[in-house]
Amino acid sequence: MSTDAKAPTAAPVRGGRTPEPSVVIRRSKQNKAPLFLILPTIIVLVAALGYPVGWQLVTSFKKFGLKQQFGVPAEFVGFENYITLLTSSELWVVVGRSLLFCLVAASLTVSIGGLLALLMQRVGTAGRLILQVSMLLAWAMPVVAAMTVWVWLIDWRRGVLNWLLVRMGVDAEGHNWLAEPLTFFMIAIIIVVWMSVPFVALSIYAGLTQISGEVLEAAAMDGATGWQRTRHIILPLITPVLSIVLLLQLIWDLRVFTQIKLLQDAGGFANETNLLGTYIYQLGVGSGDYGMASAVSVFMLILTIAISWYYVRSLMKEEN
Amino acid sequence: MRRKSIVTGLLTALAVVIALIWVFPVYWMFNSSLLPNSVLQSTTPTFLPVGGSLDNFRAALADGTFFTALGVSLTVTLSTVVAVLIIAFLGALAISRFKFKGRKSFILALLLIQMLPAEGMFIAQYKMMSSVGLLNNLMGMTLLYTAAVVPFTVWMLRGFVAGVPAELEEAAMVDGLSRTQAFLKITFPLLAPGLVASGVYAFLQAWNEFTVALVIMTENQMKTLPLWLRGFVQASATRETDWGMVMAASMLVAVPVIIFFLIVQGKMSSGLVSGAVKG
C-alpha cells in the first residue's frame, strides 16, 4: 500500500493529518532500549501461550485412546493423526462448511456495512445519528447476552420471528429453525452478520469522512455522475479500509465459536452443524481425543495463515 | 432540487427502517425483561412493555450471585485494561520509534499469534493453569486475557505513537525540557486518544469473553458475568424457560457495557482502523 492509500483512514492526530512513518534511528548507545520495551510483551505472551502452543504441537503427534483416559501416557505416532485427518471425509466436510460459512458471512458483512456507510453519508444528520446509535447498540451487546436474545427471538413456539412470518403468510408456525443444518446456518449467518456489520459500517464511514469534499465537488463540476464518483474516487480511496475489515472478518468468521456453540446448546445437532472451532472443541473437550483435536488446530492455523498470507506479506514488505 | 430532496427523504426513511431492524433485538430484550411471564407465554407477542414491572429484575437478582459475578468481572477486566495499556504502550513505542534487530520478527509474531485457534488451546491452558495452581484465580485469568489482547493493542497503538513525530519531542528538548518531561508534556497528551481506544478495546474483550472463562473458572464464586448469564439460561431450560427473567439477566449484563460503549465510542472505530492500517 502506498502512502497515498493510507490517507483516508481516520488519523489519530487532530486536523486529519496523515502521520508520517517515523521510525527514528536512535544513537547506537541506546540500542538496548527497544529490547527492554518489548520484553514485557514477550514475557506475557510466552507465559500465557508458550506452553499451550508447544503442547499442541507435540500432542498433535500423539495418539489418545481409551487407555489414556485412565492415565496411561500417550504414545508418539508421528504423522498418524494428520494422515487420519487428511484422509477422513469428516474433516473436509467441516473445512468446506467453515470456509463457505466464513466467505458468505464475511462478504455479506462487508457489503452491507459498506452500503450502510454510504447511506450514512447521503442522509442528513438526524438520519445518520439514528442509524449510528442503533449500530452502536447492537455492537455493544455482549456476545452471550446477544445470543440469549436471539435464541428467544427464534424460539420455535413463542419466538417473534415465527409469529411475524406467519403474519406475512409463511407457514412457519412451530417451525424449529435450529433442527435442520441449512436453516441452522442461515440463522447463524444472520446473527453473525448482525453482530459484525456495525464495526464494518462505522469503520468504512470513518474512512469516507476523510475523503475531502473538494475533490468530489471538483469531479462533480467536471461532470462525473454519482456512480462515477463512487467508483473512481471513493472506492480507490477507501480500499485500504475495505481490505483490512474484509481480512479481519474472514479471520473472525473462520474461527467463530461462541455463537455456534450457544446455538448448538439451544437445540442444534452438533454433528451436522460443526464448524472448525466447535469441531476441535468436540474432539478435545468432548471426546478426550487431544491428539486429533491438536492436529485439527494446527491445520486450522495453517489455513488461517494461507488465507491471510498475501496481506501479511504486503504488510511485512512495508516494514522495510 | 425538488427531486434531490425527495431522494434524500427516501434514503432517510430507509436509514430509519434499517436502524429499527438493527436495534430490534436490543429493544426486544428490554421489552421482554419488563413483561410478566404470563404475558410472554402467550403465542401473540406484546410489543410494548405497557403495565410492565421490575419483577423480573428482582427475581434475577434474588440469590445475590449477580453481584459476586459482577465483582469478578470488574476485577479481571480492570486489571486486564491496566496491564494491557502499560505492556502494549512499551511495545508500540519500541516498534514505532526504534529500528532494531528482530523488529520485523516481533511484528510478524504479533500478527501470527492473533491467528492461533483458541479452541485448541483451552485444554492446554487448563492443564497449565491447574499445574501452577492458577485455576479459579483472578491473576491467572488476567494473564490469559492480557496475552489475548496485547498483540492487537500493540498493533493499534503503534499507529498512534507513529502519529506523533519524534521531532516534536526533540524540539521540546532543545527548548530545555528533559527527555522525560518532553515525553510527559508533549507526546503523552497527543497519545491519550490512542490509549483510550486501546483501553476500550481491552475492556470489551475482557468483559465479554466467554470460552476461556468457561474452562478456567470452574468454581461458582469465580464465575464472570457471561458465565453467570449462561448458567441462568441453562438453569431455567430444564423447566419451561422463564424468558422474562432471562431477558432481565441479559439486560443486567449488557447495559453497563452499552452505557460505557456509548460514552467512549467515538474513539473506537477510528482507532481500530487507523491502528490497523497505519504502517
Image (cartoon, helix red, strand yellow):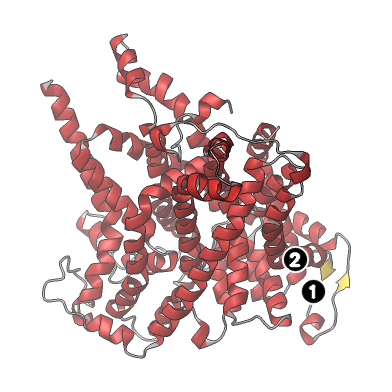
Residue type for callout 2: Met
Q: Residue at x 27, y 77 (%)?
A: B244
Residue type for callout 1: Phe
Using the rendered view, name the quadrant where residue A218 is placed: top left
Q: Picture coordinates of residue B214 (x, y %)?
A: 55, 75
Answer whether residue A254 is visible to the viewer in this image.
no
Q: Residue furthest front?
A: B176
Helix, strand or loop status at disc 2: helix
Answer whether residue A153 is visible to the viewer in this image.
yes
Q: Picture coordinates of residue B32 (x, y %)?
A: 24, 72
Q: Chain of mark 1?
A: A
* Quarter in which the C terminus of chain B is drawn: top right
* Closer to us: A177 or A256: A256
Q: Is residue A320 left or right of residue A215?
A: right
Q: Is residue A52 left or right of residue A195?
A: right
Q: Chain of mark 2?
A: A
Q: Residue at x 17, y 69 (%)?
A: B46
Q: CA distance from mark 2 to mark 1?
A: 8 Å
Identify residue for label 1.
A64
Is there CB contact under 8 Å for labels 2 and 1?
Answer: yes
* Closer to us: A36 or A217: A36
Identify residue for label 2.
A292
Q: Is residue B69 positioned above or below A137 on the image?
A: below
Q: Residue furthest top?
A: A222
Helix, strand or loop status at disc 1: loop
